[in-house]
Image (cartoon, rainbow, N blue to C red):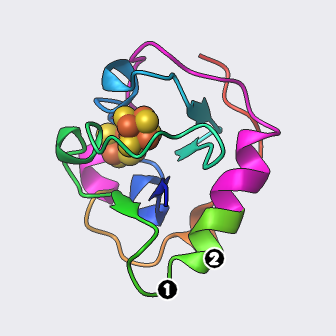
Amino acid sequence: MTYIVKDACIKCKYMDCVEVCPVNCFYEGENMLVINPEECIDCGVCVPECPIDAIQADTVDGSEFWVEMNQKYALEWPRITLKGESPSDADEWKDVPNKFPNHFSPKPGNS
Ligand code: SF4
Ligand code: SF4
């Protein structure tokens, strides 16, 4: 089992999750974060830290896509351990549904 980040995180990136992870397994893209499923120790500490419930267990139905997506980009993006600046328009994006097809960026983050 692991935890993964879903597309609710896109363009929100509040980053309250990263500093609580005991194994530093969050990775930063240009507009969202992912978890490395190989490194996550399933502690669940990050889940209540995310204000928009973007983090969920892989036992939830339909998680296969997100496990693969998190694994792929965790290997391409830089590790992030400190909370950075959220985009100024993050609040406007937090309730937008199904952001992956139209708003996902595969570019690495740079904070
Ligand atoms: S707190 Fe939630 S929305 Fe923010 S970066 Fe972490 S997973 Fe993404
Ligand atoms: S569940 Fe625990 S180990 Fe996994 S990403 Fe969240 S805080 Fe890190």
CA separation in Å, label 1 and label 2: 7 Å
Side (left or right) of 3 relative to 111: left
Q: Secondary structure at mark 2?
A: helix
Q: Secondary structure at mark 1?
A: loop
Side (left or right) of 44 relative to 102: left
Q: Residue at x 58, y 68 (%)?
A: 66
Start-end of magenta stretch: 69-93
- Point out residue 32 in the picture as x, y percentages from the top left corner: 53, 45
Residues 18 and 24: in front is 24
Look at the image and tell me in which quarter the C terminus lies. top right
Vertical placement of residue 5 versus 34, above or below: below
Q: Amino acid at mark 1?
A: Gly
Which residue is denoted by mark 2 in the rendering?
Answer: 65
Q: Residues within 10 Å of mark 1 (few under 14, many from 20)?
A: few
- Point out residue 28 in the picture as x, y percentages from the top left corner: 61, 33
Residue 61, quarter of the rendered image: bottom left
Residue 48, quarter of the rendered image: top left
Res 89 seen here: no
Q: Residue at x 51, y 76 (%)?
A: 63
- Point out residue 75 in the picture as x, y percentages from the top left corner: 80, 40
14 magenta-colored: no
Side (left or right) of 105 relative to 84: right
Which residue is denoted by mark 1 in the rendering?
Answer: 62
For the stretch drawn in magenta, the main secondary structure is loop
Side (left or right) of 37 relative to 107: left
User: Are the residues at dot 1 and dot 2 in contact (C-beta closer than 8 Å)?
Assistant: yes
Rendering quadrant holding ligand 1: top left
Q: Residue at x 71, y 25 (%)?
A: 78
Residues 14 and 63: in front is 63
- Point out residue 8 in the picture as x, y percentages from the top left corner: 39, 62
Q: Residues within 10 Å of mark 2 (few under 14, many from 20)?
A: few
Vertical placement of residue 10 versus 83, above or below: below
